[in-house]
Image (spheres, coloured by chain):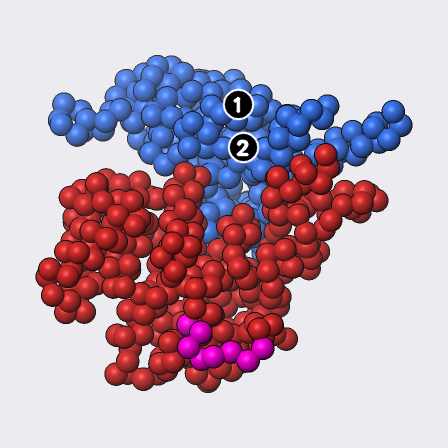
Chain colours: A blue, B red
Amino acid sequence: MLVKINNLSYIYNPNTPFEKKALDNINLQIDEGDFIGLIGHTGSGKSTLVQHLNGIMKSTSGSIIVDGINIYDKDANLREIRQKVGLVFQYPEHQLFEETVYKDIAFGPKNLGLKDEELKQRVKSSMELVGLDYDTLKDRSPFELSGGQKRRVAIAGVIAMKPKLLILDEPTAGLDPSGRDEILDEIRKLYLKEGITIILVSHSMEDVAKLSNRILVMHEGKIIINDETREVFKKASELEEIGLGIPQITSFMREFKSKGNDVRDDILTVEEAKEEILKYLRRNKNA
Amino acid sequence: MFYGNKKDGVQNMDDIMIKTDKVTYEYKSNIDDSVQTAVKDLSIEVKKGEFLVILGHNGSGKSTLAKMMNGLLLPTRGEVYVSGMNTKDEDKIWDIRSKAGMVFQNPDNQIVATIVEEDVAFGPENLGVPPKEIRKRVDEALSTVEMLEYKHHAPYLLSGGQKQRVAIAGILSMNPECIIFDEPTAMLDPNGRKEVMGTIKKLNKDEGKTIVLITHYMDEAVKADRILVMSDGEIALEGTPKEIFRQVEKVKELGLDVPQVTELAYELRKEGIDIRNDVLSIEELVDLLC
């Protein structure tokens, strides 16, 4: 168990006419090796929740335990928490500030006390993980890079801290389809190869269906669904009611089944749909 | 290379909303001062009443092209005409911008006032429209985007989709014939996207506005009358949604995507299943397989 959240609430402007419960009694456990998709419409509390996980925001009530440390303990070392829980904000490229790509990525690990060769290796491996070439890019100004590259530099800066849990808040917003696929592939690699536990906040049902093994659905500050990805997308009408949806391919399979065709309706990707339809067509041919 | 849509033969100039004639846009790179070309010798026409979608990967030149369509950027070479007016004609620039309005990605950057109806009134006020007429236009514009009941609200309390619809109303109040949308749904959640796409379709079908929509979402592009795909500042593909998306490999080569059902139909064909290659919707594919 990596993170345990108990009865967490956060109230904006308490005791004023503008009082608003942004988080309403959240209980959640995140295990090592989870790949969580966090979905919900704007204002549902997703960003507020993830900002609590590394202590950037402090709850009104409740507790959070990260890797055995109660982050609201008086002696809790928040620096240690922020090393363990890496948070990549929306449009993270807006937070680049150093003169060179190297310096920007090195900023965090340097503060951890890394020096010389160790620091260099850390920067280099972080860049490689997000698909940036160390030799050609390390001395460039991050501001000269393309949008997708800038975003990678920002992600590399967080990965360089070697977090156990990496939270990405809409990492593909504004990217074109191939840029989106590249970033998602790199996230998948971080998960599979580096064993980092991931929380992916996204508005794209297709993306979370492809990548995550568990989905949290937030609505009005509450977690209303917490289940395996395949189970969550069976609840089409429930999701549509709160302004979300299911991937087009899942929707197609459900529609096809409803016409009396005996196929699985819990399909998540085009690849799975292809296998299932081929099986079905061949079965019918032989019948 | 395609030069506009010539299927209808010779066209009357009056049918043309926007025309670019051999337009090139160059800028100096901020890395090494070399000259970069964002748009290369491009000639296109946008017909009145048309719903045109422009696709292309990041850096393909589509936003530069869009900004030239209402004179926010002027071409290095070539001419851009909006309703017959050249965007280089300084005396016409305000006429051009009220004929062809523009809506951008981030609604927060486009809203200037602290009350919804004041924001929508900002454009016509600057055009010197009489107050009574402004009142009428603001109410009409807000009712078109279905935000009339929010007219006394503060924009910062609205959702992303609502803010973006207020931004659209701010353009509508200037009575444009054409609206150019530069990734208007990129920052919105699924609900916000649905609201804004609903509004755009309504503006085209019910209000007869010419629409130019730049997007990275293929499910939005399938709604278009015609699609232009840009790559390296040039038109790489042009056609109806069916004509474009049937070219699955080519589209992917250009850094884009196809709808999931289109991809499934394509994959099934590859496996020898006899199925049309221009499927765009769930209903079509269900019908074909049943």
Category of crowding for the residue at label 2, using alpha-carbon neighbours closer than 10 angstroms: few (below 14), some (14–19), many (at least 20): many
Q: Position of residue A143 (x, y in %)?
A: 43, 61
Q: Earlier in the sequence, mark 2 or mark 1?
A: 1
Q: Is any part of residue B8 visible from this angle?
A: yes
Question: Which quadrant is home to the N terminus of chain B?
Answer: bottom right
The residues tagged by marks 2 and 1 sit, at their Cα atoms, a distance apart of 9 Å
Q: Is residue A75 above or below residue A134?
A: above
Mark 1: amino acid: Lys
Q: Is any part of residue A188 visible from this angle?
A: no
Magenta stretch contains residue B233: no
Start-end of magenta stretch: B9-17
Magenta stretch contains residue B13: yes
> What is the chain letter for disc 1?
A
Q: Which residue position is annotated with label 1?
A: A235
Mark 2: amino acid: Ile
Left or right of residue A259: residue A5: left
At 66% from the left and 27% from the top, the residue drawn is: A259
Left or right of residue A35: residue A193: right
